[in-house]
Image: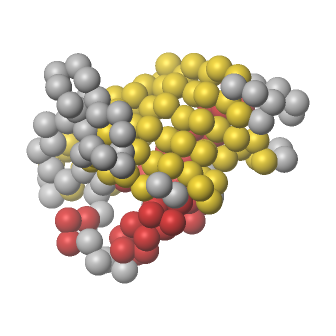
Amino acid sequence: MSDFQSEAIADFLYAEAAAIDEQRWDDWLGFFSPNAEYWIPAWNGEHELVDDPNSQISLIYYSSRSGLEDRIFRLRLKQSSASIPMPRTCHMVSNIRTSKVDDRHCGVAANWQTHSYRFDETTTFFGRYSYLLAREGQKLLIEKKKIVVLNDLIPTVLDIYNV
């Protein structure tokens, strides 16, 4: 693949969503480059997000994949009481738009919705994703993932599996 193809990118995003829904944690981590930034910014106002994860409040921020690996490690060992039992989740990704950045990188925007079920209760979160994807040979990897949660009055735990 010499160019980024929309169908391949959509399949990549769908596969990432399926990996987290099925709690295939190693597969899910494999979508991220070692230096991948994973950021869920907080809202600074009704229509304004924070713009600096290093100096402002974020809902979640990991500057590299090692932060995600640590989170998965704690989930596997059941060291996260807020995640016991793990909810059942269903991620839906739609309205995928791509823009070529350079020969190795592609920007991707998408909408998302996640339903989580736990303790006889269903919670829905929704918002927008923006990605910076990089081509490593024939493989795509996430270098940056920014997740905007539009309904951020959070009635329960918000974790990586909810978004």
Q: Nearer the viewer, residue 159 or 100?
A: 100
Residue 10's spot in the image, x, y percent? 62, 30
Q: Which residue corresponds to the image point at 40% horizontal and 45% vertical from the top-left? A: 39
Q: Which residue corresponds to the image point at 62% horizontal and 21% vertical from the top-left? A: 98
Q: Quadrant of the C terminus?
A: top left
In the picture, measured across the screen, residue 120 lies left or right of residue 73, that is: left
Q: Nearer the viewer, residue 48 or 152?
A: 48
Which residue is farthest front?
A: 55
Which residue is farthest right?
A: 2
Look at the picture and state if 50 lies above or below 138.
Answer: above
Look at the picture and state if 154 lies above or below 22.
Answer: above
Residue 61's spot in the image, x, y percent? 37, 51
In the picture, measured across the screen, residue 138 lies left or right of residue 43, that is: right
Look at the picture and state if 80 lies above or below 155.
Answer: below
Q: Name the colouring of the figure.
A: secondary structure
Q: Nearer the viewer, residue 91 or 61?
A: 61
Q: Which residue corresponds to the image point at 36% horizontal and 49% vertical from the top-left? A: 54
Q: Is residue 76 visible?
A: yes
Q: Quadrant of the N terminus?
A: top right
Q: Nearer the viewer, residue 109 or 67?
A: 67
Q: Which residue corresponds to the image point at 44% horizontal and 38% vertical from the top-left? A: 146
Q: Is residue 161 visible?
A: no
Total numbered labels: 0
Residue 7's spot in the image, x, y percent? 70, 26
Residue 150: quarter of image: top left
Residue 83's spot in the image, x, y percent? 25, 65
In the picture, measured across the screen, residue 105 lies left or right of residue 111, that is: right
